[in-house]
Image: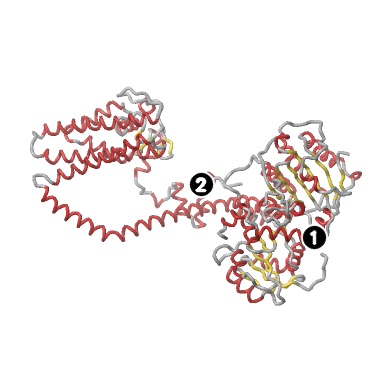
Amino acid sequence: MNTPEKKPVEVVLVDDHRMFRSGVKAELGGTVTIVGEAPDVDTAVAVITRTRPPVVLLDVHLPGGNGNGGVDVLHGCRGLTTADGQPVRFLALSVSDAAEDVIAVIRAGARGYVTKTIGANDLTRAIQRVADGDAVFSPRLAGFVLDAFGAAAGEIAEVDEELDRLSAREREVMRLIARGYQYKEVAKELFISVKTVETHVSSVLRKLQLSSRHELTAWAMGRRLL
Amino acid sequence: MRVDPERTLTWPSSTLNRLGFGAGVRQDEGMPTPYERPVPPTDTRFAERRVARPTLTRPAEGRVIAGVSAGLAAHLGWSVRWVRILFVVLSIPTGAGLVAYVFLWALTPLSRGGVVDGRRRAVDPADPAAVAGDPVSGDPVSGGPVLEAERDATRVLLVGGLMLALGLVVVAQNAGLNARLGILLPLLVVAAGAVLAWSQLDDRQRGRWLGAESGTRRFSAARLVFGGVLALAGLVIMATRGRSLEAIWDIGAAVVAVLAGIALVAAPWGLRFWSDLRHEQAERARATERADIAAHLHDSVLQTLALIQRKADDPAAVNQLARAQERELRAWLYAGPADSDATLAAAVAEVAHEVEDLHGTPIDVVATGDRPLDDGGLALSRAVREALLNAVRHGQPPVSLYLEVGPLGVEAFVRDHGPGFELEEVPEDRLGVRQSILGRMDRHGGTARVRRLEHGTEVVLTLPAATAAAQPNAAQPSPAQPSPAQSVPATSEETREHA
């Protein structure tokens, strides 16, 4: 992307399938350093607390903990920072397409969500983006967001600060991501910079995490997060 | 593609046995195994007889007391009248008919409209007693269930009381009015009370099916109380025979003490029995669920894995199989209970899956909002299909499909990452396809356009809101686009097909 040659990002890989972990390790090889692995919630919290990586690749469904999988890891690692003071950031990775699973990990603090079928290049890019503090929205997550905020039904925030709705621009960004556009393409389409796109996406992420919109609350309630 | 319960039941049990679900399934299927030969003989006889004659049940329709005679007559193929006469005749000298009647009453399930506990009762249409009304009272099958219930209840009281009185008198006469009456009278009183209370149980079950009326409920409550008092009075009379009430008092206290002692000793067993029962029920439910899942996995995943192994040298086929299986499993795991085949989003997703199966190229489907499938929606889904076929044939993966259903209209975006195309280089067939996309959307008041992007092509289909789409508007290329896509600035690369 705009900063192509960076030093490899240190990543902890949390997934209960050994085959998937080794697959990801083989794929990511040079661009990312895997500094730790964990197959369940408790090991994950221990490993992350010990290694304090900038990015954690987190499976949504994990054994152990309170039975909430990735959400438990996020709760267990709340407030952790890396050696240079950055917060430990999480990228959710799942085969689940169920909206409540995805929304639950995002609301618990994950910076993005990608499906496990994602290609190696896209995954590397997503990890890099999360390490830089940006949010990663897959088309599917964008679709969920549009659904959850009623944006598809035409509900648009008057003021950008309104937490329960998306602004018109945020909605456009989400729509383009849902259509399969990369951030770069979104920027081109809307005549804005990639940085601005990232700002919009982060703002949507913040709304997603803080909003008390009842659909989100219902999801959270279903997962016993409240 | 949800698993259908019938299919899971017809599952080869050998497979399930291997998976460790043998016991539960064998029971479900009633599989005859050499070790299960000595099943209770009623079971096999029951099965044989079901073919020959109707199952023994107590029909709720056309009964006088509890429907035992009517049911027995239907079962044996005799006349109801004769069965009833037989019962009465047997009751008079020794009370054997009465005992047999009560016995059958307790053990025969009640049926209503030929249905017993969800099973179909084979009603013999040639037997008027089983189908038509009561031949004794001449009543036809009554219209209103409430009315019938009320009449039933009254009949139960009248006939039951009458019969008991009759039996009592006859018995007393036979015995020459000696001391035996002192035992028999309270016995009969107890029996009457029990009968009243039990018939109440019957009606409670019926009330659950029909939605109990408050009037009949009060009536049946009164009956229960009356029955209980009657039975109690009978017991007291029997116990106090020839003694004063004070003597009984001591006995009563002793009995209560013994009962309390037994309750105290038996309580832990009772509790454990109860919890065991609950545990077993939960266990059975879990086993059924597991059998269901195993059945589904075998049907789908294991079969696909076998296929994949056989096609290991064909990566495209393997990919396609894996993809299709993933989708199927996902649908089974995450789909809601409601079948939503008739909605636009479901139709479009179905189309995408079809194209995916046809060509083996993965298509990412994202849909927000939904609405019922109408003519316009159908046209849209067909146009989406053409666009997807285009994308997988001429473009490059990833191919993505985004469907947004809002109050102002429907938009669908089909995007591929191919090299794009020049209009002049477009082969004839593709132009034809495009015409069909455009023509189709036009006919339903929508629009279609093809945009060329830096990487790939995007087909944008729009449809106005459902109300407008209801009347297909032929020659109107919809100058004002009634969709939120207005706010997307048109780029220079955009090619409007209308031009």
In the image, what residue occupies the spot 86% across and 54% down? Answer: B454
Q: Which mark is residue B9?
A: 2
Dot 1 falls on a residue whose secondary structure is helix
Residue situated furthest top in the rendering: B138
Camera-nearest residue between B230 and B426: B230
The chain to which mark 1 is attached is A
The quadrant the C terminus of chain A occupies is bottom right
- Up the image or down, B31 lies above or below B146; here it is below
Q: Residues within 10 Å of mark 2 (few under 14, many from 20)?
A: some
Q: Is residue B398 left or right of residue A93?
A: right
Dot 2 falls on a residue whose secondary structure is helix
Disc 2 versus disc 1: distance between alpha carbons?
57 Å
Q: Is residue B323 left or right of residue B81?
A: right
Picture coordinates of residue A175, whole percent (x, y): 75, 51
- Which image quadrant is residue A31 in? bottom right
The chain to which mark 2 is attached is B
- Up the image or down, B283 lies above or below B480; here it is below
Which of the two discs, 2 and 1, sits closer to the camera? 1
Question: At label 2, which amino acid type do we have?
Answer: Leu
Q: Is residue B137 left or right of residue B4?
A: left
Task: Have a look at marks 2 and 1 and say if they share a chain.
Answer: no
In the image, what residue occupies the spot 72% across and 36% down? Answer: B376
- Can residue B292 be seen here? The reply is yes
The quadrant the N terminus of chain A occupies is bottom right
Camera-nearest residue between A5 and B55: A5
Q: Which mark is residue A196?
A: 1
In the image, what residue occupies the spot 16% across and 56% down? Answer: B254
- Can residue A98 be seen here? The reply is no
